[in-house]
Amino acid sequence: MEAKFEKNTFGKRLKTMLKVDFKRMFTMPLVYIMAGVALAMPILILVMTSFMGGEPDPATGAEATAMFTNVWQAISSVSGGNAMTMDLTTMCNMNLMYFAVAILVCVFTAEDFRSGYAKNLFTVRSKKVDYVFSKSLVCFVGGVIMILMYFVGAMLGGAIAGIPFTMEGFNAGEIVACMFAKIFLVAVFVAIFLTFAVIAKQRTWLSILLAIGVGAFMFMMIPMMTPLNANFIHVIMTLAGGAIFAVGLGAVSNVILNKTSLV
């Protein structure tokens, strides 16, 4: 009787890798710590800044107003203003979560190389392209969790601080589009950060330094791609950008892993 061997396809290998990576991620304290930080950050920002209003300006004598005039400013800003204007509401909003995604990707990936897991994985069975695709998808999910936790925290923080939920210059549908755009934009940053992570390997400090440096350079672009008054175009652009970066930089990450030492 002739023995039949089941073909080990890319889909089956990826499914196995995803199962392992999801298990590794959700058994590490890191993802829960980052999710907790994402939840607590907007609460602290909105509550603390709500106390900044009401005190007169010593220079002009005019009464100061709270930094956030509505809760939605903790999510993003409305497009159409001066893109170069940087105040508290444009700096301290959901866009900070992309820096948190950098830490998640870099620490999670570096742990694979530091522990010897990656070297053992590539030696015994898995291909590097499977690893890149799996890490991209798993870190994307981790990033989305942080985005959603921040949104929940912003709603709670606004309620606690008594900041109004009024919508000025946008509507509920545009907020939904804004959230989808921010979620899809996570894929762009994950692809960039993963490339730096496989370059640095076990050197977490180097990958975080590179990732945050590029993140800071791109920080000014985020409000333009994910404004509060986002529309279908913003959603499609970020979705397409996420797919292009995931495939393009995923291929770059695969080449790096193939051409460099795993230690």
Image (cartoon, grey):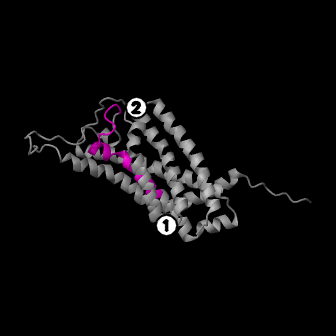
- Closer to the observer: label 2 or label 1? 1
Query: Which labelled disc corresponds to residue 5?
Result: none
Residue 249 versus residue 120 in the image, above or below: above
- On the image, the x and y values in percent for residue 211 come to 45, 55
The number of callouts visible is: 2
Query: Which labelled disc corresponds to residue 174?
Result: 2
Query: Which labelled disc corresponds to residue 203?
Result: 1
- On the image, the x and y values in percent for residue 110 come to 51, 64
Magenta-tinted stretch: 79-104
Seen at 78% across and 54% down, the residue is 7
The question of residue 244 being in magenta is answered with no
Give the secondary structure at mark 1: loop
Residue 25 versus residue 191 in the image, above or below: below
Give the secondary structure at mark 2: helix
Name the residue at the right extreme.
Answer: 1
Residue 12 versus residue 185 in the image, above or below: below
- Asked if residue 251 lies left or right of residue 89, the reply is right
The crowding category of the residue bearing disc 1, from other C-alpha atoms within 10 Å (few below 14, some 14 to 19, many at least 20), is some
- On the image, the x and y values in percent for residue 114 come to 53, 69
The crowding category of the residue bearing disc 2, from other C-alpha atoms within 10 Å (few below 14, some 14 to 19, many at least 20), is some
